Structures are given as C-alpha cells and as structure tokens.
C-alpha cells in the first residue's frame, strides 16, 4: 500500500542529516554557541524517514524534540570538529548529506583548563578565536556518488552569497534562507533553491515541514535516477 502511495521511494537509501548548533568550549563551564533550534534538520530527517530512507541524524545542541522513528539513528555531537568526525565516518556509506546544522564558525584558539576568574577591577575580557573546519566544503570536495546539500543563512545579499557558497563548497544544492527576520526557531520560512547551472527557484512561504518534504522530493528524484 505504501508503495502504491509512492511513499517508500527511498527504501535502501542512506542519508545523513545534521541539525542544531555546535558549541565550542571556552572553559570547563562555558561555551560559544548559537540559537539554532534544529527544527529544519529534524523536519528533513523526518521527511526522509517517511520516504523510507535510513537516516543518520547528527545533532549538536537542539531545542526541538526528535520524533521516535525506527529509521532515524541519532548521533549526538558537541563541537564542529566532533560533527565533522561523525559525518566523515558515515559519509562513504551514504547516498546524500544534508547540512542543516549551524556549526560554530570559530573556536577558541586555546580554551582554558580552569574556569576563567574575574580579576580585581577587570572590566573587559578579550578572547582570540580561530576558524573551525567547514564540514560542507570538506564533504563537497570528497564526494563520489553522494548528493551534497547545504543551507545558506544570510541577512543581506541573499542570492549572491548563496551562489558563492554553492560554488565554494562544491555543493549540489543550496537552500538560501533570509535570516534577517527571525526564522531561528520559527515555523514559517521563505527559501530559494540553487543548483549549479540552473535558474534559482523561489519557493513560496511555507512551514519548515513543508520545505522539508519538498526538498526530500527533489533529492529523491536525483538519488534514485540511476537505479
Ligand atoms: N557549514 C559547515 N561547516 C561550518 C560552517 C557551515 O558545514 N563550519 C555549513 C552549514 O551547515 C550550511 C552551510 O555550510 O549548510 C552554510 O552555512 P552558513 O553559516 O550560512 O555559511 P558559512 O560558510 O559558515 O559562512 P558565513 O557564516 O560567514 O555566512
Ligand atoms: Ca556560519
């Protein structure tokens, strides 16, 4: 019946989806983080599972519940480097990677072994950060048969910045997302789909669940083409 309804189109496929924000340690009790809820990535993982795919969901810090699903294998990570390691370990055996996570772009150049103490009369604190690895770009450069999908969260020059991410990260698809008006944690979203050498597709404003379903449909067409 499910096959008749066309719902199990991805059975036998393995996909990796990342969600949520990563955290970089400052000292034993503090971290640098961001306010990603994980909602988009979890919606994508759920849509993939609904289509019959086996999903490895790699999550950092999330404030959205992950639904119980036999096809969703949950992996918890803390930092951007942890997330890269986990994704890299799963990548060879996968058909698709969707980077919906918000990895921290910077980590402390050297984190503190002990809790940072305020000094008498101290009014400022200066910390030096250094860049974290770019997971999407690393996998984009490494991909064989895998379809590699990323997001572009922008507050200005949306399409221009998204197009440069598509190119720089060797992604097959970028979903461009205007985050200037509080989409973090929100339910509705208007995005654009970018693919190399193709017209930009504006998608109507819809829920993150609807975006997830539309994206999974798009990905299904691409990863089931050759078999
Ligand atoms: N991404 C990643 N590894 C990072 C940072 C980002 O894999 N260290 C991925 C995100 O998951 C997303 C895409 O790259 O799919 C774009 O993330 P975004 O934050 O929009 O872009 P950045 O490349 O980090 O650039 P900037 O934040 O300066 O716009
Ligand atoms: Ca970033």
Image (cartoon, helix red, strand yellow):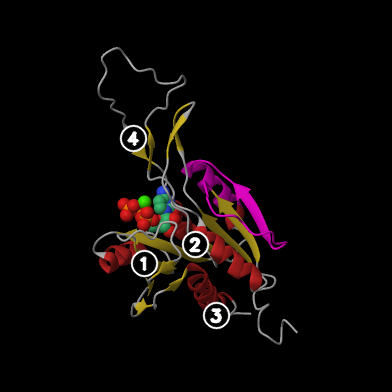
Left or right side of 214 for 69? right
Q: What secondary structure is found at the residue carrying circle 3?
A: helix
Instruction: State the mark number for residue 129.
Output: 4
Q: CA distance from mark 1 to mark 3?
A: 20 Å
Image location of residue 19, percent across then percent down: 51, 55
- How crowded is the residue under tag 1: few (<14 C-alpha within 10 Å), some, or many (20+)? many
Tell which circle, 1 or 3, labels the residue nearer the N-terminal end.
1
45 left or right of 200 in image: right
Q: Is mark 2 within 8 Å of ligand 1?
A: no
Q: Which mark identifies residue 221?
A: 3
Q: Percent from the top left, x then y, of residue 129?
A: 33, 35
Residue labelled with disc 1: 176
Magenta residues?
A: 60-89
Residue at the extreme top? 120
Q: Check if mark 3's residue and mark 2's residue have beta carbons within 8 Å.
A: no
Above or below, 119 against 29 in this view is above
N-term-proximal mark, 3 vs 2:
2
Q: Is residue 86 magenta?
A: yes
Residue named by callout 2: 40
Classify mark 2: residues with Cα within 10 Å, few (<14), some (14-19) or many (20+): many
Closest to the observer, 221 or 153? 153
Q: Residue at x 39, y 60 (%)?
A: 183
| Precedes in sequence: disc 4 or disc 2 | 2
First in residue order: circle 1 vs circle 4:
4
C-alpha span from label 4 to label 2: 28 Å
Q: Nearer the viewer, mark 4 or mark 2?
A: 2
Image position of 62 with respect to 131: above or below: below
């Amino acid at each position: 019946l499910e096959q008749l309804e066309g719902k199990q189109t991805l059975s036998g496929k393995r996909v990796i989806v990342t969600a949520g924000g990563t955290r970089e340690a400052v000292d034993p009790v503090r971290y640098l983080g961001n306010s990603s809820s994980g909602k988009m990535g979890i919606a994508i993982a759920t849509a993939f599972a609904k289509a019959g795919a086996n999903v490895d969901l790699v999550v950092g810090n999330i404030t959205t519940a992950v639904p119980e699903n036999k096809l969703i294998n949950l992996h918890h990570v803390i930092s951007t480097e942890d997330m890269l390691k986990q994704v890299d370990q799963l990548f060879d055996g996968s058909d698709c990677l969707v980077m919906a996570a918000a990895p921290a772009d910077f980590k402390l150049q050297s984190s503190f072994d002990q809790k940072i103490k305020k000094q008498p009369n101290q009014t400022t604190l200066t910390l030096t950060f250094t860049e974290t690895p770019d997971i999407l770009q690393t996998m984009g450069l490494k991909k064989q048969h895998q379809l590699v999908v990323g997001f572009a969260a922008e507050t200005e020059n949306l399409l221009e910045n998204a197009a440069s991410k598509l190119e720089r990260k060797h992604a097959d698809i970028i979903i461009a997302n205007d985050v200037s008006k509080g989409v973090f944690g929100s339910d509705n979203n208007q995005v654009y789909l970018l693919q190399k050498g193709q017209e930009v597709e504006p998608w109507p404003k819809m829920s993150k669940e609807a975006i997830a379903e539309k994206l999974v449909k798009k990905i299904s067409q691409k990863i089931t083409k050759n078999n």
